[in-house]
Image (cartoon, rainbow, N blue to C red):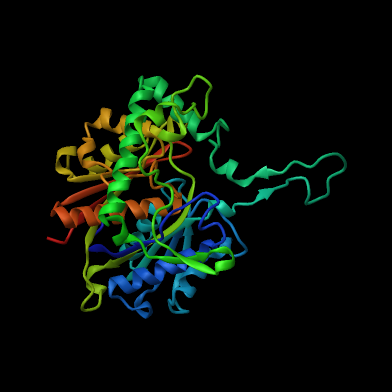
Amino acid sequence: MAFDNIVLLGGARTAFGDFGKSLRDVALSMMGAHVARATIRRSGVSASEIDHLVFGLVGVVDHDGPFISRKVALDAGLPIESSALTVTRACGSGTQSIVSAAEQIASGHSQIAIAAGGESFSRVPYVSRAMRYGAVRGPVTMEDGLDAIYRCPFSKALMGDTAEELAHRFGYRREAMDDWGFMSQQRAQAAIESGFLARQIEPIDVPDGRKGTRSFAIDEYPRFNLTREKLATLKPAFKADGTVTGGSSSGVTDGAAALVVARVDSLPVGALPEARLVDYAVAGVPPEIMGAGPVPAIAKLLRQNGLTVADIDYFEINEAFAVVNLHAEAQLGISREKTNLYGGGISIGHPPGATGIRMTITAMHHLADTRGRYGVISMCLGSGMGMAVLIENLIR
């Protein structure tokens, strides 16, 4: 369904931390509450006026993981009477938090909500399936909890293997993937150096050994001054004779992000809507080529709203793997000159609960800066789907 008079504002996120580095000792609920408070402050809405919070994630960690939406809501200062919802839609979990908040508003069950999400992949535990009822004898296997997140639920293949399959079926070459990965790193570095990304980041204090704490405010995963020649030397990451490398794959990262989602006539005086949430679409694809998902999702979204690719001023398409973007470019005719201009999953990183929100904030800021009208945010979803959201700029 198309949404009516539902707007977005106040976006904020943490800097994204590289796996096992700056954010590894910060609980996900702490990150979530931190960005929710920043979002409230930036939006001009009082916490007491917010009646709902939706939190998206794929990795449940820490003791409060099953209840994280409620924990984040109350820690961020929302009223005890407010409600909370936790959602999961694979790599679109952050995007789904926006959509679910909007659906609550559209159905009359909420007026002003926070859409938030994040991941603490560095804190995902190892598990032993043999220990609950007691191992009888012999060694006990410990399984990496992240392994389940990165495997197809049908074939058990790694998501990188599905990227290899997409490249094989459609003939995308490694050189083209490396070119995209290199471009992503260059764009992220430029966006950091220009201050564009700093606008969306809310610095957070992180543990710093004997020094106590330090402020963490710059994305940790981008590889500054990476050369195209260096990318060419990387070995395939998933198949010995494959084409997908670490340089053309998204980074395993930690982080959280949030936005205010509201009915425009419910906002207090002084709160400035930045974009309108127009519509969304989800479409299925074969799980073994899940990276094809953005193509039918974007096509469906545009069809629902009587638009074409040419009508869209800016695209954010998640760089789960470079082949995902190459496929969208080839199949839909989307120019890379209006896609992911500030880096993406390959350079900034990809914590699924936060990624869709990060991309939406980026699209909002780009449209406001350039006075463009429409933006599309899209991603592939493990298990074989694609998701796409349409926003309209209100800052002109």
Residue situated in front as seen by the camera: 114 or 119: 119
Q: Could you tell me which residue is drawn at 45 percent across and 78 percent down?
A: 81
In the image, residue 393 lies at what x, y percent? 18, 57
Residue 358 x, y percent position in the rendering = 35, 54
Using the rendered image of the protein, determine whether residue 287 is visible from the camera's viewpoint: yes
Q: Can residue 110 be seen in this view?
A: no
> What residue appears at the point 13 percent right and 54 percent down from the top-left corner?
371
Position of 375 with respect to 40 (left or right) is left
* x and y, in percent, of residue 128 in the image: 73, 47
Side (left or right) of 62 relative to 76: right
Q: Quadrant of the C terminus?
A: bottom left
Taking 12 as reference, is 301 left or right? left
Q: Quadrant of residue 343?
A: top left
Closest to the observer, 264 or 125 = 125
Q: In this view, does 96 lie above or below 148?
A: below
Name the residue furthest right. 137
In this view of the protein, which residue sits in the foreground, 24 or 298? Answer: 24
Of residues 280 and 36, the one drawn nearer to the viewer in this rendering: 36
Left or right, 158 with reference to 343: right
- Where residue 111 sits: x, y (%)? 32, 71
Q: How many labels does the image show?
A: 0
> Above or below — where is 14 with respect to 326?
below
